[in-house]
Amino acid sequence: MKNFGPKFTRRAVLAGSAALGGLAAVGTPLSVLARQAASATASRFDGLAERMRGTVIVPSDDRYDDVRKVWNGMIDRRPGAIARCSGVADVMEAVRFAREHDIPTTIRGGGHNVAGKAVRDGALTIDLAQMHGIRVDAMAKRARAEGGVRWAAFDHETLVHNLATTGGTVGSTGVAGLTLGGGLGWLMRKHGLSCDNLVSADVVTADGQFLTARADENDDLFWALRGGGGNFGVVTSFEFRLHELEPVTGGMVLYPRDRLEDLLHFYRDYTASAPDTVTAMAGALIGPPGTAVEGEVAGWMALCHCGPAADGDKAVRPVRDFGPAVLDTIGPVGYGGMQALFSGAATPGLRNYWRSNFVKSLSDDVLDTLLARADGLPKPGSMLLIEHMGGAVARVGENETAFANRGAAYNVSVLGTWVDATDDAENVPWVRAAGDELREFATGGAYVNYMAGDEGEGNVRAAYEANFRRLVEVKRKYDPENFFSSNQNIAP
């Protein structure tokens, strides 16, 4: 078989153009043409529903427009069909059907990825949203989550046992995408990335076969899944290591624009000596409603301390000593509360365009660039974001997992978020320019989960750094024809 994607897309476009031209010549109404085109597309998927226990949704289905949506409102793509899988057998059948009929395929777990790779025009979307089972083994400190689970649901099941693992910073994020891309989160400096806590994964490969990847079985695939993205198969189940959850002290402080420069320098000094029990973030954003800086550029800092309450009080004292904030939510808070801290900025349907760069230090040049770019922040939810890494993240070797950026001390990102499509022409160039300027001071790598869809092969290669060549070898073994290509792609 060949790489289906480009061939199918070009063939579909040519065929569609010819059909529309011929019908239009005899005066057929465009509404009829649209229905006929949808019917022709749907016919490619005849027979798939009979092979599945789940459902197959095509463009004529009343549910289609709702189901095809993903989190990023900038993504408006029309899959040829959506296979809503009920279990592993459905995933295997969907992969095999697509191979048999030369249909390009995408995979959707939580659908939260900013690049929108989960959907593609004309393709078959293998949708795992109905696969949301979670099982916690509290005695063994293990949890297994199916591929459609989101972190809020995962945390709900583990926290009742006072257990947790690193799961990002927003509860609506999908377990699958976050983990496969690495998994930065509030607990990373103490317990490592999400992918560092992955114990095993069940995978449907490009030939429709089922296998398990772990340290002692298909270990090369297990290595690649921990940071290599969705390049190697459909992960139908993840098994994680859990940790006893100590008291959490955390929250956010907010300062007016005239304190931003001092805040960024304070943050640099604070994180240089912070213990591994603290994960801290900072940057600039548009002040939220109801605050003294509503609608204005403001500086912010957020932190999560996981440990005895007395140690948490000690950890947050320097932040309080920095000066009075216009908003201060720091205090004793459950881990679930930390996971909900940024939920308001992660509203589905908003338009998102991001850039990310790993840096080894917060040099004056980096901080000056952030200050210069702060006043151009789009509204309402955009932010400049610095995430402090190190700690347990850095104690994993660069080549131990596919996630290679272990030596970076910080991830510096430009997260553009706005409401109206009419603002794209102003906001997208601002994000690109700020990201490109920061890249001058970066390691060359970027966080795969924050990459937009137009960053090019060179930047994808740089994101995987020294591990790229080995990832290509694993790709050739498990997906030699690049069946799984709708991702930050590692071509075989």
Image (cartoon, rainbow, N blue to C red):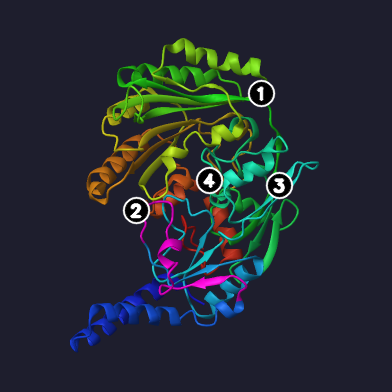
- Select label 4 or label 3 by which is in front: 3
Q: Which residue is mark 4?
A: 466
Does residue 91 belong to the magenta stretch? no
Q: Which residue is mark 1?
A: 307
Mark pair 1, 4: CA separation? 35 Å
Kindly identify the amino acid type of the residue bearing the numbered disc 1. Gly
Task: Answer with mark 4 or mark 2, whichever residue precedes in sequence.
Answer: 2
Q: Which residue is mark 3?
A: 143
- Residue 251: image x %, image y %? 51, 26
Q: Which residue is mark 2?
A: 74
Q: Secondary structure at mark 1?
A: loop
Task: Answer with mark 1 or mark 4, whichever residue precedes in sequence.
Answer: 1
Is residue 38 visible in the rendered image? The answer is yes
Residue 261: quadrant of the picture: top left
Kindly identify the amino acid type of the residue bearing the numbered disc 2. Met
Whether residue 102 sits left or right of residue 418 in the image: it is right
Q: Are marks 4 and 3 in contact (CB under 8 Å)?
A: no
- Select label 4 or label 2 by which is in front: 2
Mark pair 2, 1: CA separation? 40 Å
Local crowd size for mark 3, using a 10 Å CA cut-off: few (<14), some (14–19), many (≥20): many
Kindly identify the amino acid type of the residue bearing the numbered disc 3. Ala
Residue placed most toward the observer, 463 or 42 = 42
